[in-house]
Image (cartoon, rainbow, N blue to C red):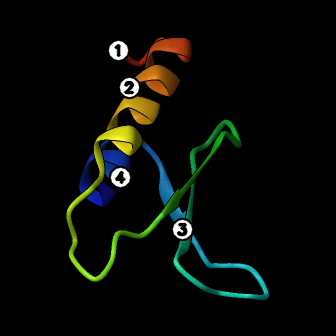
Amino acid sequence: MVGLLKLLGYESKAGGKTGGSRRKFINADGHIISLHEPHPNKIVKCYVLRQIVITFKERGIL
């Protein structure tokens, strides 16, 4: 997922004060995508993929 977001112009942004598993990605337009990092495995959940697809369709990326 990180590689795909990077290809689409999103950069990883450092976590907030609490850290945790939340990861934020921001593009040049200032659009932020906020996701939980999957753990203990690095397998992205289906609901996250659906959420990303919906977001990309709304933004005209897909």
Q: Which residue is mark 3?
A: 23
Q: Residue at x 35, y 14 (%)?
A: 62
Q: Which residue is mark 2?
A: 53
Please state which amino acid type lies under the numbered disc 4. Answer: Lys
Determine whether the residue tagged by mark 4 lies in a helix, strand or loop: helix
Determine whether the residue tagged by mark 1 lies in a helix, strand or loop: loop
Please state which amino acid type lies under the numbered disc 2. Answer: Val
Please state which amino acid type lies under the numbered disc 1. Answer: Leu
Distance (Cα) linking label 3 and label 4:
13 Å
Determine whether the residue tagged by mark 3 lies in a helix, strand or loop: strand
Please say if 44 is above or below 58.
below
Q: Which tag, 2 or 3, sits closer to the chain's start?
A: 3
Q: In which quadrant of the rendered view does residue 52 lie?
A: top left
Query: In the rendered structure, are the residues bearing label 1 and label 2 in contact, judged by CB atoms less than 8 Å apart?
Result: yes
Q: Which tag, 3 or 4, sits closer to the chain's start?
A: 4
In the drawing, does residue 60 fall left or right of residue 14? left
Q: Which residue is mark 4?
A: 6
Please say if 40 is above or below 32.
below
Q: Which tag, 4 or 2, sits closer to the chain's start?
A: 4
**Label number found at residue 62:** 1
Distance (Cα) linking label 2 and label 3:
17 Å
The percent position of residue 48, horizontal first and vertical second, equals 40, 44
In the drawing, does residue 61 fall left or right of residue 42? right
